[in-house]
Amino acid sequence: METTPDPVVRMLDEDEASRRLGIELLDHGPGTSVLRMTVTSAMVNGHRIAHGGYLFLFADTAFACACNSHGPVTVAAGADIDFVTPAYEGDVLVATARERTRFGRSGIYDVTVVRGDTVIAEFRGRSRTVRAPGRQPSPPPAD
């Protein structure tokens, strides 16, 4: 008997951006996920702190895992992040995503990024389930 692949594991297996950053899935369930990432030298900015774009990507990946845990392909409709305290090269960060609510094809998810007991960032994502799962064709290159 063939089993349906876990939608979160399948999505992350195809997510080269997250894989290249060393993001690891620690745990997940319906509407939740927990991920880990170590800040590398390539992720720090000119102030020698973790670049906000990498922190956003990390939180966004946890959000994606939580909102895709229900099965249908779900994408971000929007997101906000508040940077609370800096992260530094070598820091091991954990992002925990939790579903706040789902309504129709939309949802709201909160993600907390921590280093140990210290909150690094708070992220809120708004999701939208798409009707047609699968890849959409890429537009032709512009002339």
Image (cartoon, rainbow, N blue to C red):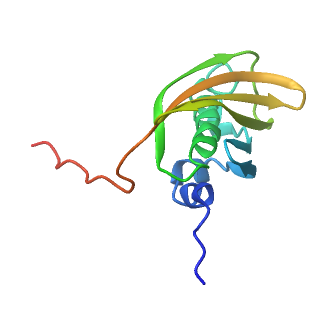
Estimate the x, y position of residue 67 in percent, counting from the top left: 58, 41
Q: Determine the residue located farthest toward the right in the rendered image.
A: 117
Q: Residue at x 89, y 32 (%)?
A: 116
Q: Residue at x 47, y 34 (%)?
A: 104
Q: Is residue 128 left or right of residue 68?
A: left
Q: Residue at x 57, y 27 (%)?
A: 125
Estimate the x, y position of residue 89 in percent, counting from the top left: 75, 34
Q: Determine the residue located farthest toward the bottom in the rendered image.
A: 1
Foreground: 57 or 130? 130
Estimate the x, y position of residue 10 in percent, counting from the top left: 56, 61
Which quarter of the image is occupied by the N terminus? Answer: bottom right
Total numbered labels: 0
Q: Residue at x 68, y 47 (%)?
A: 30
Estimate the x, y position of residue 53 in percent, counting from the top left: 56, 28
Task: Examine the image and state in which quarter residue 117 appears.
Answer: top right
Q: Is residue 141 left or right of residue 70?
A: left
Which quarter of the image is occupied by the C terminus? Answer: top left
Q: Determine the residue located farthest toward the front in the rendered image.
A: 104
Q: Is residue 3 above or below residue 12?
A: below
Q: Is residue 69 above or below residue 42?
A: below
Task: Examine the image and state in which quarter residue 59 appears.
Answer: top right
